[in-house]
Amino acid sequence: MPRHVLAICGSLRATSINRTLLHASQMQGLKHALNITLYDGLGDLPIFNPDNEQTPPKSVLAFRAQLSHSDAILIASPEYAHGVTGAIKNALDWVVASGEFMQMPVAAINASGRATIAQAALIETIRTMDATIIDDACVTIVLNGKNYSTDDIINDPETARLLDQALGSLRKALDESDQKRDIA
Ligand SMILES: Cc1cc2nc3c(=O)[nH]c(=O)nc-3n(C[C@H](O)[C@H](O)[C@H](O)COP(=O)(O)O)c2cc1C
Protein backbone atom coordinates (compact mmCIF):
# COMPACT_ATOMS: atom_id res chain seq x y z
CA MET A 1 0.00 0.00 0.00
CA PRO A 2 1.45 3.42 -0.88
CA ARG A 3 2.21 5.68 2.08
CA HIS A 4 2.18 9.46 2.10
CA VAL A 5 5.28 11.35 3.20
CA LEU A 6 5.55 15.11 3.59
CA ALA A 7 9.05 16.38 2.77
CA ILE A 8 10.18 19.65 4.36
CA CYS A 9 13.22 21.55 3.16
CA GLY A 10 14.73 23.86 5.78
CA SER A 11 16.27 26.14 3.15
CA LEU A 12 14.37 28.79 1.18
CA ARG A 13 17.19 29.17 -1.35
CA ALA A 14 16.06 28.69 -4.97
CA THR A 15 18.97 26.34 -5.74
CA SER A 16 19.02 24.58 -2.35
CA ILE A 17 20.92 21.28 -2.35
CA ASN A 18 18.63 20.10 0.43
CA ARG A 19 15.61 20.64 -1.85
CA THR A 20 17.39 18.86 -4.70
CA LEU A 21 17.97 15.93 -2.33
CA LEU A 22 14.27 15.89 -1.45
CA HIS A 23 13.36 15.95 -5.16
CA ALA A 24 15.63 12.92 -5.64
CA SER A 25 13.85 11.30 -2.66
CA GLN A 26 10.53 11.83 -4.42
CA MET A 27 11.79 9.82 -7.40
CA GLN A 28 13.56 7.14 -5.35
CA GLY A 29 10.61 6.90 -2.93
CA LEU A 30 8.42 5.33 -5.61
CA LYS A 31 10.59 2.18 -5.37
CA HIS A 32 9.40 1.84 -1.78
CA ALA A 33 5.78 2.84 -2.49
CA LEU A 34 6.34 6.15 -0.73
CA ASN A 35 4.45 9.07 -2.27
CA ILE A 36 6.54 12.04 -1.23
CA THR A 37 5.03 15.54 -1.45
CA LEU A 38 7.28 18.55 -1.04
CA TYR A 39 5.84 21.13 1.38
CA ASP A 40 6.19 24.52 -0.29
CA GLY A 41 4.81 26.87 2.37
CA LEU A 42 7.77 27.24 4.73
CA GLY A 43 8.49 30.82 3.65
CA ASP A 44 4.84 31.83 4.11
CA LEU A 45 4.62 30.90 7.78
CA PRO A 46 4.68 33.98 10.03
CA ILE A 47 7.16 34.20 12.89
CA PHE A 48 5.84 31.97 15.65
CA ASN A 49 3.98 33.71 18.46
CA PRO A 50 2.44 31.59 21.24
CA ASP A 51 -0.34 34.20 21.57
CA ASN A 52 -1.60 33.14 18.12
CA GLU A 53 -1.28 29.40 18.63
CA GLN A 54 -5.04 28.78 19.12
CA THR A 55 -6.10 31.11 16.30
CA PRO A 56 -3.30 30.72 13.78
CA PRO A 57 -3.31 32.20 10.28
CA LYS A 58 -4.38 30.11 7.26
CA SER A 59 -0.82 29.24 6.29
CA VAL A 60 -0.27 27.55 9.66
CA LEU A 61 -3.62 25.72 9.48
CA ALA A 62 -2.70 24.47 6.00
CA PHE A 63 0.70 23.27 7.28
CA ARG A 64 -0.92 21.44 10.20
CA ALA A 65 -3.47 19.84 7.85
CA GLN A 66 -0.74 18.61 5.50
CA LEU A 67 1.12 17.07 8.43
CA SER A 68 -2.05 15.40 9.74
CA HIS A 69 -2.70 13.79 6.36
CA SER A 70 0.82 12.31 6.18
CA ASP A 71 2.09 8.94 7.36
CA ALA A 72 5.67 10.17 7.86
CA ILE A 73 7.84 13.28 7.56
CA LEU A 74 11.14 13.61 5.72
CA ILE A 75 13.29 16.66 6.51
CA ALA A 76 16.47 17.98 4.86
CA SER A 77 17.76 21.20 6.33
CA PRO A 78 21.11 23.03 6.27
CA GLU A 79 23.23 24.31 9.15
CA TYR A 80 23.44 28.06 9.76
CA ALA A 81 26.08 29.23 12.27
CA HIS A 82 26.06 25.88 14.05
CA GLY A 83 22.28 25.89 14.43
CA VAL A 84 19.22 24.85 12.47
CA THR A 85 17.82 27.41 10.06
CA GLY A 86 15.32 29.90 11.44
CA ALA A 87 12.85 28.76 8.78
CA ILE A 88 12.73 25.12 9.93
CA LYS A 89 12.74 26.00 13.64
CA ASN A 90 9.91 28.47 13.10
CA ALA A 91 7.82 25.83 11.31
CA LEU A 92 8.45 23.29 14.06
CA ASP A 93 7.58 25.80 16.79
CA TRP A 94 4.10 26.24 15.22
CA VAL A 95 3.37 22.52 15.74
CA VAL A 96 4.96 21.77 19.13
CA ALA A 97 1.71 22.20 21.08
CA SER A 98 -0.76 21.33 18.32
CA GLY A 99 0.76 17.85 18.28
CA GLU A 100 0.96 16.83 14.61
CA PHE A 101 4.48 15.47 15.18
CA MET A 102 3.48 13.27 18.14
CA GLN A 103 4.25 9.61 17.31
CA MET A 104 4.90 10.68 13.71
CA PRO A 105 7.74 8.71 12.07
CA VAL A 106 10.40 11.23 11.03
CA ALA A 107 13.58 10.88 8.96
CA ALA A 108 16.07 13.76 8.89
CA ILE A 109 18.53 13.46 6.04
CA ASN A 110 21.63 15.61 6.03
CA ALA A 111 23.08 16.89 2.74
CA SER A 112 26.38 18.05 4.26
CA GLY A 113 29.20 16.17 5.96
CA ARG A 114 29.99 19.29 8.01
CA ALA A 115 26.52 20.06 9.33
CA THR A 116 26.69 17.76 12.34
CA ILE A 117 25.64 20.29 15.00
CA ALA A 118 22.45 21.36 13.23
CA GLN A 119 21.55 17.77 12.38
CA ALA A 120 21.89 16.77 16.05
CA ALA A 121 19.91 19.84 17.17
CA LEU A 122 17.16 19.14 14.64
CA ILE A 123 16.81 15.55 15.81
CA GLU A 124 16.80 16.66 19.47
CA THR A 125 13.99 19.15 18.77
CA ILE A 126 11.92 16.60 16.89
CA ARG A 127 12.45 13.99 19.60
CA THR A 128 11.32 16.54 22.20
CA MET A 129 8.13 16.94 20.16
CA ASP A 130 7.43 13.23 20.80
CA ALA A 131 7.95 12.23 17.19
CA THR A 132 9.42 8.82 16.38
CA ILE A 133 12.86 9.36 14.88
CA ILE A 134 13.75 6.56 12.47
CA ASP A 135 17.48 6.36 13.22
CA ASP A 136 18.43 4.16 10.25
CA ALA A 137 16.72 6.65 7.94
CA CYS A 138 18.70 9.65 9.26
CA VAL A 139 21.60 9.37 6.83
CA THR A 140 24.21 11.91 5.77
CA ILE A 141 24.63 12.19 2.01
CA VAL A 142 27.55 14.47 1.28
CA LEU A 143 26.47 16.81 -1.52
CA ASN A 144 28.08 20.12 -0.57
CA GLY A 145 30.44 21.34 -3.27
CA LYS A 146 29.24 18.74 -5.79
CA ASN A 147 26.62 20.86 -7.59
CA TYR A 148 24.55 17.70 -8.18
CA SER A 149 21.20 17.67 -9.95
CA THR A 150 18.39 15.32 -8.96
CA ASP A 151 19.48 12.90 -11.70
CA ASP A 152 23.10 13.05 -10.52
CA ILE A 153 21.99 11.99 -7.02
CA ILE A 154 19.97 9.08 -8.42
CA ASN A 155 22.75 8.00 -10.81
CA ASP A 156 25.71 8.22 -8.42
CA PRO A 157 25.94 4.73 -6.87
CA GLU A 158 26.94 5.99 -3.40
CA THR A 159 24.36 8.78 -3.05
CA ALA A 160 21.67 6.49 -4.52
CA ARG A 161 22.62 3.73 -2.06
CA LEU A 162 22.39 6.04 0.96
CA LEU A 163 19.11 7.53 -0.19
CA ASP A 164 17.76 4.05 -0.76
CA GLN A 165 18.85 3.07 2.75
CA ALA A 166 17.03 6.08 4.23
CA LEU A 167 13.80 5.54 2.31
CA GLY A 168 13.87 1.76 2.75
CA SER A 169 14.32 2.20 6.51
CA LEU A 170 11.44 4.67 6.63
CA ARG A 171 9.19 2.27 4.71
CA LYS A 172 10.21 -0.63 6.99
CA ALA A 173 9.38 1.42 10.09
CA LEU A 174 5.94 2.24 8.68
CA ASP A 175 5.28 -1.43 7.88
CA GLU A 176 6.43 -2.53 11.35
CA SER A 177 4.18 -0.01 13.08
CA ASP A 178 1.24 -1.28 10.95
CA GLN A 179 2.00 -4.84 12.05
CA LYS A 180 2.12 -3.81 15.72
CA ARG A 181 -1.23 -2.04 15.33
CA ASP A 182 -2.76 -5.14 13.68
CA ILE A 183 -1.57 -7.39 16.52
CA ALA A 184 -2.81 -5.02 19.27
C1 LIG B 1 24.09 32.26 7.16
C2 LIG B 1 24.80 30.97 6.86
C3 LIG B 1 25.47 30.30 7.85
C4 LIG B 1 26.09 29.06 7.59
N1 LIG B 1 26.68 28.38 8.61
C5 LIG B 1 27.15 27.14 8.39
C6 LIG B 1 27.67 26.34 9.46
O1 LIG B 1 27.68 26.75 10.61
N2 LIG B 1 28.11 25.10 9.18
C7 LIG B 1 28.08 24.58 7.91
O2 LIG B 1 28.47 23.43 7.72
N3 LIG B 1 27.62 25.31 6.88
C8 LIG B 1 27.15 26.57 7.08
N4 LIG B 1 26.65 27.30 6.04
C9 LIG B 1 26.67 26.72 4.70
C10 LIG B 1 25.32 26.09 4.34
O3 LIG B 1 24.92 25.16 5.30
C11 LIG B 1 25.46 25.42 2.99
O4 LIG B 1 25.70 26.43 2.05
C12 LIG B 1 24.26 24.61 2.57
O5 LIG B 1 24.53 24.02 1.34
C13 LIG B 1 23.05 25.43 2.38
O6 LIG B 1 21.98 24.56 2.10
P1 LIG B 1 21.04 24.77 0.85
O7 LIG B 1 21.89 24.57 -0.37
O8 LIG B 1 20.00 23.71 0.99
O9 LIG B 1 20.48 26.15 0.92
C14 LIG B 1 26.05 28.53 6.28
C15 LIG B 1 25.39 29.25 5.26
C16 LIG B 1 24.76 30.44 5.54
C17 LIG B 1 23.98 31.16 4.45
Image (cartoon, rainbow, N blue to C red):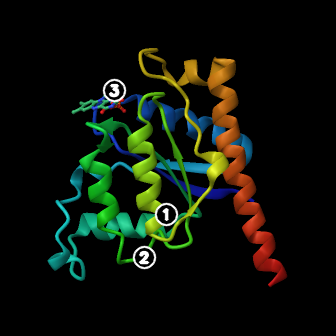
Mark 2 — residue? 99
Mark 2 residue crowding within 10 angstroms, few (<14) / some (14–19) / many (20+):
some
Mark 1 — residue? 127
Judge from the rendering whether residue 148 lies leftward or rightward of residue 56; answer left or right. right
- Marks 1/3: CA–CA distance: 29 Å
Residue 106's x, y, as percent? 55, 57
Mark 3 residue crowding within 10 angstroms, few (<14) / some (14–19) / many (20+):
few
Mark 3 — residue? 15
* 182 to 173, vertically: above or below: below
Label 1 sits on a secondary structure element that is helix
Q: Are marks 1 and 3 in contact (CB under 8 Å)?
A: no
Of residues 48 and 122, the one nearer the viewer is 122
* 129 to 140, vertically: above or below: below
Question: Please, what is the three-letter code of the amino acid marked with disc 1?
Answer: Arg
Question: Please, what is the three-letter code of the amino acid marked with disc 2?
Answer: Gly
Is label 3 within 8 A of ligand 1 (CB to nearest ligand atom)? yes
